[in-house]
Amino acid sequence: MKRSVGFLACVLLIAAGGLRAAEPEKPESIRIPGFTAASSDHQRGVEERMADLLDPAATARHFRVLTEEPHPAGSAENLKLAHYVRDQFAAAGLEGVTIHRYDVLLPWPRKVAVSMLEPVPMTASLAEDGTPVDKDSYAVGAGLTYLGMSASGDVTADVIYAHSGNPEDYDWLVKQGIDPRGKIAVVRYSNPYSYRGFKAWEAERRGVAALIIYSDPMDDGYRKGDVFPRGPWGPESHIQRGAITYDFIVPGDPLTPGWASTEGARRITQEEARSVPRILAVPMSWGDAKPILESLEGPVAPPSWQGALPITYHVGPGPAKLHVEVEMDGETRPIWVVEGRILGSEKPDETIILGNHRDAWVYGAVDPSSGTATLIEAARVLGTLARDGERPRRTLVFASWDAEEWHLTGSTEWGEQFAAELGKGAVAYLNVDSSTSGPNFGASAVASLNRTIVEVARDIIDPNSRGSLLEAWTKAAAAPGDDGDPSGPLVANDLGSGSDYTVFLNFLGVPVVDLSFDGPYGVYHSQYDDLYWMEHFGDPGYRYMTAMVEVWGRLGLRLANADVHGFDYRQYATTVQGFVDSLADVPGLRDELDLTAAGAVVGEWRREAEHLQQMIDRVLTTGNEPASETLSDLNTALLGVERELLLADGIPGRPWFKHSLYAPRYTYAAMSLPGVREAAEAKDWELARRQLEALVERLQAATAATRRAAALVPAP
Amino acid sequence: MKRSVGFLACVLLIAAGGLRAAEPEKPESIRIPGFTAASSDHQRGVEERMADLLDPAATARHFRVLTEEPHPAGSAENLKLAHYVRDQFAAAGLEGVTIHRYDVLLPWPRKVAVSMLEPVPMTASLAEDGTPVDKDSYAVGAGLTYLGMSASGDVTADVIYAHSGNPEDYDWLVKQGIDPRGKIAVVRYSNPYSYRGFKAWEAERRGVAALIIYSDPMDDGYRKGDVFPRGPWGPESHIQRGAITYDFIVPGDPLTPGWASTEGARRITQEEARSVPRILAVPMSWGDAKPILESLEGPVAPPSWQGALPITYHVGPGPAKLHVEVEMDGETRPIWVVEGRILGSEKPDETIILGNHRDAWVYGAVDPSSGTATLIEAARVLGTLARDGERPRRTLVFASWDAEEWHLTGSTEWGEQFAAELGKGAVAYLNVDSSTSGPNFGASAVASLNRTIVEVARDIIDPNSRGSLLEAWTKAAAAPGDDGDPSGPLVANDLGSGSDYTVFLNFLGVPVVDLSFDGPYGVYHSQYDDLYWMEHFGDPGYRYMTAMVEVWGRLGLRLANADVHGFDYRQYATTVQGFVDSLADVPGLRDELDLTAAGAVVGEWRREAEHLQQMIDRVLTTGNEPASETLSDLNTALLGVERELLLADGIPGRPWFKHSLYAPRYTYAAMSLPGVREAAEAKDWELARRQLEALVERLQAATAATRRAAALVPAP
């Protein structure tokens, strides 16, 4: 639709005398990685047909349904939306549309209460205020505000303010003679983001009796800009819900670590589960936190701990004394993953999975409904193309996950359930969680997919600038006065965790991509992340959700239709060289570990990848079009390279995390070469040496797989 | 008293078995600059006798009298305190104790009112709240809060927020399409400090209808630390009063620019006076400013403009609309300068002036009563010494200025009145304005006095660390991990304006020193700058005021008793070389001006000064003590060097400012080589060239004077 209007305008302008410059220039056509020139042209034709089908109005319709009611995991409303997604998949002509049920640990709260006993009695509202301009802000069905996987309990204790609740914050307090043990720690959400589960983990480790995490206006409120409903930032009563599951240890249902929570599956007890926190934790608005913080005495907090509340922050302990009660029901609840496919015409067993979660903390306009609307629309346009004769060569799988907000649950259970077929045939997993909170494009991926993503962005028009998305992306990413390097820094290759790609990358060794359009957004996981917010601030007109359908769809189709898988292992090896180089920054590592072998094997991989690429380019650019079947063995071999990077036993202490190049830190930040790095940071040099050996072995295996692939390139 | 206790403790410790390390080590004895070894030893003996006379209890007694009532310039209370100071001077045995009267323009307010008409009717309180712990905070006699020298008028207009009211702030607004003309500009006090009169000047220049200057908690309130009465920072209702006189054009009574406001003196009209603002201006607390600022719409202010109020700052214009009324009485009022002397035994016509102003905005505990108590105590201890036979060789003049807060008035009128004798005999002016707001020593001076100040600090014990004041000063001044260079960066040589040294330095060419002990201080010019504040935060125990008596007294005595004036012209020339070098940073200057001659003459001055110093050192260190009369011509010659740096016509547009090396910027910031620099910054290259010639001429004259002095050094 968007494109049709543009086309019409162009025709009219030409008719009016050729003022063609008013129409954005068509991006320069470059051969798509993995395609011959002819199939590249054909592919672009297919993609243009897809783009012509895009309809912001359709996206808006789905989005309004998805954000009509609060729909947390385990709720009847989220099951209703599973049915909605299923019906839309079916209407789009998808095949094998199915709802998978998993029964997972998903306790809901019976009671959450915080009151101040001293110095001034006060009961925290723990509720978000309605505003007349936005009917949804009177979210009567939203229920209690809480942190998923909090322990149950009843604590009365003095308060300390512990800044962001990071290890160095507690260290500072201890240095002042302030013992966090037995205290109630009030900490703020971190900006830049650090996973709230890490705050709980650290507090539990320090012997804190209960944890309160509040949203300081410095981080997502009035100090950032106008607050809802005047602007996109968080108002006084907004509360960031969320889970505190220790899924950096093992994600998915805590009771089935490493296998699927299907009917009759073995389950461990909650006490055995390593990802279940043992600490009480409650989220809070700054409106509730302010009287507590302003009652604190003790030392003045350091300048960097001072937030934007109109007080001087002290750290306590006391005289503020709180009574915190949390009662969770400890229940297991069913969750629902919706799946549908467009079967590939040539290689139906090779799959490209497009996934997004559906469960929200309240309405979840940005997170995740912008992604869910995008997913439904992507299924519609790609389904329509297939029905109209443009069936992809490989299979596109559409997945609507559930309970991502709890422990990345739906995707993890599904990935564990279908590990065998995914290990064999999954080409890539393309994740869109929050599709759109603004106009700034961002992508994370394994480095072998950098080039493919950049080339997709080159062929898409950015709705705001009307230049290419690649130009807008480059401009936004580049430092002022810097030109930026599109194939280098644009795609982030530091993959941490916090979304549904985790099982694919870390457990299955499937190449992953994570996509989003971002902007100013201060209502994350609050009830204000709603329709009003999106239509006024995030994506008025649904132009960026529609752009995401195009990005996602073109990327899926390119991976599905490539003559040869477009993985760029040269770039991958270069990126891994950077990982290896950065190891030398770990204090003491230079004296203890010899990185020569690791550097050498990465260099070897780089050379083999260069050779492979030359061979592939030759067959794709020279003479006759290669027949599909002559490339079949090569493609199978190419699929195997990423899998070779998995460690059979995972990384030390976290066997579920098998990828040798990536794992999330406990903060969800990315950690490269995690086995070596984590041991080295702990100064366990013996373990670090063994992990280095294991890493070198995996890199050698990837190198050998690359070499084998090169040998399978047919003569042109 | 302080010293006696120390001495007693020492004796007891030695008696107890020599635990001498518990007593701070006596600072290493170095020959005092300008003294022979013998006179240096004698001088230290005199200074130790002075130190033995110090009495924090006496300082406290004076301080409590001085801070008992609000005592602004022109008030009966401040006249009463003039009598108090006079009586203390007389009791201390000072000679020629006099009160000089000057009648100066000093309008008081009849009415100050600010109300918001839209969007929410509101009347600003323009008053400071009392707090039960501090009786003085119910300052019933404090009168209206206002800005001295505001115009009278009545304005109703839309509001803009213009950050700090600097030129670049208005430029930003204009770039957004926001016209400041006819608007009421709300601006915040600046941190670091910029003179409020500059904000008025800039607002007037921009056509702003009225100016409101408020205290943002980011700059002096809760974001800095605990607020009064819990801590030293400014509470919600505190108001920074102050004058907005354009005394950067010409200080002193605006009606007698360049001559004294004595009885029968010629007076110009207010309309003719260049230092009288034509704009309405009102000071405000953040408590009053908040509802105005939070009513503003228009663009969100840039991040650096966001203060610490719990709002997102917008710039307007409107919808906030204010009605501002100021009615000043336009009166001339008498002010009172108290003077007393300790006549020199050998050179009574050579004077060292110790000055401090007495007038306050309210109680003025820090500003200026800490300095006034210090002045009275200095007069007492030095008077006692003289009476006990240790009369200084040169005359010490003690001066209690008035109306410094208005236009540096009392000191300026006095300096203008006695210009002839000061030009001839003034050795140095030693200013203490706010003596003490904390424990951190600071000194500004002409560079020829750096060494003398540093050597004084070496001989004084810092009350907190019990090491030498020089060590404490060096430690506080040095960057972390840096050793600091005591003779270099410790004394600041960038002399701007904002206190009573101005007439001495800029009009008379007398070397000046400005001394203070500073600390966290957020109640400047508010009623909370009171006894409670000082005794709880600024200087509990009066240890630092007492230390300032010692610094000031030792410095005065060294200048009064030196065999040869201790001016270090080597350091002065080096500092001026830095000034010349920094000219090259003025954009475009390198292409337009040739700094060779200036560099050459400074080099020549440096060499002459080196030669002079060698000659002096030889005569002071070799063989017999030189007879005082043989050094008389040398000393007279040395006094003349600074005077040679005066420009007969002053700097362009500001003829009162005659010093070729310094003038205040309109912000009060220091500007070196002002004639050249100001013309170059305005890209008036023709004027800049002429000013450079004039500067070179003055430097040549100073060099010649230095050479003449060297020729007058007697043979050892």
Image (cartoon, coloured by chain):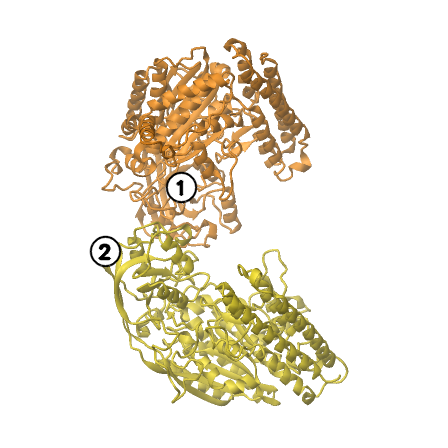
Chain colours: A yellow, B orange
Displayed quadrant of residue B340? top left
Cα–Cα span, label 2 and label 1: 35 Å
Q: Position of residue B262 (x, y in %)?
A: 40, 17
Neighbor class of circle 2 (other Cα within 10 Å; few <14, some 14-19, many 20+) is some
Chain letter belonging to callout 1: B
Identified by mark 2, the residue type is Val
Chain letter, disc 2 residue? A
Residue B277 is situated, as x and y percent measured from the top left of the image, at 44, 33
* SS for dot 1: strand
Q: Nearer the viewer, residue B181 or B336?
A: B336
> For residue A198, which numbered disc appears in the image?
none
Q: Is residue B715 left or right of residue B277?
A: right
- Label 2: state its secondary structure: loop
* Number of disc labels: 2
Quadrant location of the N terminus of chain B? top left
Q: Is residue B110 visible?
A: yes
Q: Amino acid at mark 1?
A: Ile
Q: Which residue is mark 2?
A: A120
At 62% from the left edge and 67% from the top edge, which residue is drawn?
A577
Quadrant position of residue A536: bottom left
Q: In the rendered image, which residue does mark 1 sit on? A: B213
The image position of residue A290, as x and y in percent, is 32, 57
Residue A40, image x, y percentages: 68, 79
